[in-house]
Image (cartoon, helix red, strand yellow):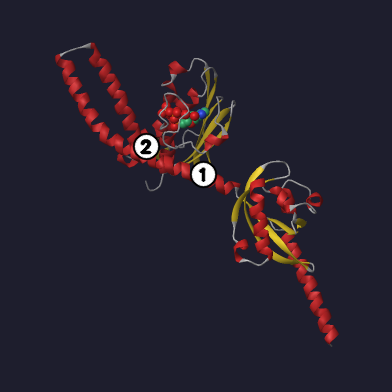
Amino acid sequence: MNQVLESMESKEIVNSEAMYRQIIEYSVETIIIHLDHKILYINQAGADFLKGKKDEIIGGDVLSIFNVEEKAMIRERIKQGMDGKKGATQLIEQSIIRFDGSQVDIELYCHPVQYGNKKAIQSVLRDITVRKETEKMLQDRQKLASIGQIAAGIAHEVKNPLTSVKGFLQLLKESNSHPYLFTMENELEKAIDTLQNLLQVSKPNLHEEPIIQIDLCKELNSLMLLFQEKLYNIEIKMDVRDCDKHIFGKKNLYLKAFFNLMKNAIEAMPFKGTLRIEHYFQDDYVHVKISDTGVGIPKEKMNLLGTPFFSSKTDGTGLGLTQVFTTINNHNGQIAVNSVVNQGTTFHLKLPQNPGGM
Ligand SMILES: Nc1ncnc2c1ncn2[C@@H]1O[C@H](COP(=O)(O)OP(=O)(O)OP(=O)(O)O)[C@@H](O)[C@H]1O
Ligand SMILES: [Mg+2]
């Protein structure tokens, strides 16, 4: 009877060991089991992540993936882990060097395990590159957004006195027509315009406008005419279909957004190129695509698009795309950007026919 029980017990152990192995093998995280720093086991996801071959990694030194200056600290944690000290099981962030030489940020914890009949250490490594990038992006965005808010506050305060100066200048012009007065007025108008743009993108609700029906095909054609003098080296391709599908929204905001996108596209092609405007209806949305064959946008700059004051141009304010993103979001539309450096950029807008609660 005892023998039967014992054999059932050992069978269970074998079964649970096999199950444990399977869980580890198919885990998406990197799991390494090591003893005296010698790697006894690594799962497939781990070998893939470390860019090495499983059988070449096994038998190697687990410390080899860490930077020289961190090896002593890792050695100490492993020792603490073996001694069953609590601190060793806490997560730490590290940078490691993979077998192809690439460096990557990871999160790591170690804890003791029974491996066969030996006590060993199980280390779990998690790739945190994406999380780190997202954190950095959020920080950058928050920083820029608060700069934007401060700037909008200042713009508001500065715009009023400038507007009254403009009024007085006009009065002065009537009594005394000095040529400088015209230049002064022009410059002042530019400054007020910039402030007005800034206010509009940071407080779009100030811009109360009725929601009306918009014939986008017609408007896109008219907008193109505004760029006539800049278009001598640029080929225009208009591919507008489904023009009976109208949208509802704030017309001036929409027109300004399309104007900003076209202006960017043209500015991206200083020598020559093709500007393509598409309009069609699909899956309940009106789609508008504005594509250029210009300089393109580097990958690392893509997530800055739409952030106030992000500009790569010497005389750009970096508010154009902020206005575009604010307007499209407020109308419950969507924007996708596709860009390849030196080949061109496409802004793909998906606009609902009715904007919903605005
Ligand atoms: N079609 C495009 N091709 C290449 N880069 C673009 C394109 N559209 C936008 N960008 C990049 O995004 C940045 C921000 O654009 P945005 O329209 O907000 O400001 P800007 O064009 O620099 O200035 P402003 O619109 O005030 O004249 C640009 O400076 C440019 O680097
Ligand atoms: Mg612009």
Would you say 355 lies left or right of 104 here?
Answer: left
Q: What residue type is labelled 2?
A: Val
Q: Quadrant of the N terminus?
A: bottom right
Is residue 132 shown to the viewer in this render? yes
Residue for badge 1: 136
**Residue at x 73%, y 44% (from the top left corner):** 99
Residue 275 higher or lower than 126, as above or below = above
The yes-or-no answer for disc 1 within 8 Å of ligand 1 is no
- Residue 138: image location, x then y, percent: 48, 45
Residue for badge 2: 201
Q: Residues within 10 Å of mark 2 (few under 14, many from 20)?
A: many
Q: How many labels does the image show?
A: 2
Q: Which amino acid does label 1 sit on?
A: Lys
Q: In which quarter of the image is residue 198?
A: top left
Residue 200 higher or lower than 90, as above or below = above
Would you say 99 lies left or right of 311 here?
Answer: right
